[in-house]
Amino acid sequence: MSLVSRSRELWLSAVMSSLSAQPYMVWGLVESFKVFNLPVDLTLTSTCCVFWAQNFSHHQAHSGRTLHFYRETFLPELVSSHIKYLEPGNDTRISKFLLLGISEDPTLQPFLFGLFLFMYLVTVLGNLLIIVATISDSHLHTPMYFFLINLSFADIGFTTTSIPKMLVNIQTQSKVITYNGCIIQIYFFIFFGVLDNFLLAVMAYDRYVAICHPLHYMVIMNRRLCGLLVLACWALTALNSLIDILMALGLSFCTDLEIPHFVCELNQLVLLACSDTFSIDMVMYFGAVLLGGGPLVGVLYSYSKIVSSIRAISSAQGKYKAFSTCATHLSVVSLFYSTLLGVYLSSSITQNSQSTARASVMYSVVTPMLNPFIYSLRNKDIMGALRRLFQGKP
């Protein structure tokens, strides 16, 4: 029997006893019931009224003031309580969640604050430098760097969705996040995470065309196609996030509102739900297969073709040159998917949710932070653009 059902049973029993004894005690019962956020069922209201009517002769013994109290105060309040707490979807309306974070050890909080502040600043500044250097250098106005600008922007958004709130909670020693704030965080966390995935697949296709069809590269990867590919990435991720959020808004929650994570994630919210989660589970699984597995298949197919083309090159210098054009992207792809796989395996093996939260730091914080270093240190064009940017040269 659920908590609410048991509470209703106890409440009804108490009401019956009180109605038989001293009617004014019911008022205190109703108020205490509301304090614990438990719904006052209309069925109970009706039962009480019927019981009271059947025992009216007993109540006639009380003063007219008690009868006036029932009619003018108690019954209207009981009905308004029903309207307030039992409208569809309102009986479990909550206003906040508690983000437990990576660790609840108070001695670690200053260290975690400094560490994540440093990683966040490095991520934002590094990706901003990539964006500014690419835009300011006309030599980098190519499809590959156009996609890289979008990837850098997605990485900034991905970390900004979660880290600032985490830092604020550590600084204020508060774990609270509002319901609306949690829903917004889930939307953008899904949005930028899936966008990263799509952009990496598009960039893999770009490398495939560059290596396997070098003579037709600029014809195939024209501005129109590049723009459509990026637009499709943004549109599909926005639509997917919207569907997930609409499904999440239909969830009902009980008393356990603690999220063992540093960010609101949809799967964590589903675990807290008291209502039926079959439909949202199906949407999540379908989305994971389609929007997660689809781009991964595209990446693997592109690189299988790239490897075949590189193996067909006779000279060692030609193989090295062909491989070097996709080495940076391959490094980023490997880092992204290996950390995702690590989080999935850790969540499957361990039952400790906070261990999963620590593992998820790798793909949600570390990977966006390392991407600018990978693209700058292993890419002579980006290094040259950054050098000219700092020197003030066109």
Image (cartoon, rainbow, N blue to C red):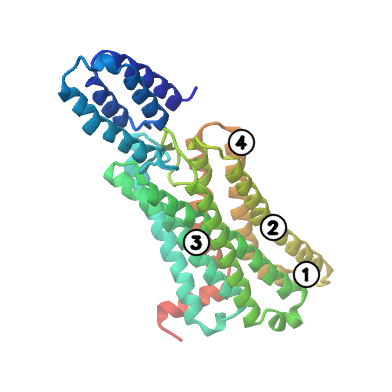
Q: Nearer the viewer, mark 1 or mark 2?
A: 2
Residue at the image point whose x is 19% and y is 28% from the top: 68
| Disc 2, SS | helix
| Residue 34, image x, y percentages | 31, 31
Q: Which mark is residue 355?
A: none
Identity, as a three-letter code, of the amino acid under mark 4: Ser
Residue of label 3: 155
| Residue 90, image x, y percentages | 40, 42
| Residue 41, image x, y percentages | 40, 31
| Residue 223, image x, y percentages | 62, 82
| Disc 4, SS | helix
Labels in figure, total: 4
Q: Residues within 10 Å of mark 1 (few under 14, many from 20)?
A: few
Residue at the image point whose x is 41% and y is 56% from the top: 120
Q: CA distance from mark 3 to mark 1?
A: 35 Å
Q: Are marks 4 and 3 in contact (CB under 8 Å)?
A: no
Would you say 233 lies left or right of 180 here? right
Residue of label 1: 316
Residue at the image point whose x is 36% and y is 36% from the top: 82
Would you say 375 lies left or right of 67 here? right
Q: Nearer the viewer, mark 4 or mark 1?
A: 4
Residue at the image point whose x is 51% and y is 32% from the top: 352
| Disc 3, SS | helix
| Residue 366 showing in the rendered view | no
Residue of label 2: 294
Q: Which mark is residue 348?
A: 4
For marks 4 and 3, the one nearer the N-term is 3
| Disc 1, SS | helix
For marks 3 and 1, the one nearer the N-term is 3
Q: Residue lying farthest bottom?
A: 394
- Judging depth in this view, the residue of 6 and 353 nearest the camera is 6
Identity, as a three-letter code, of the amino acid under mark 3: Asp
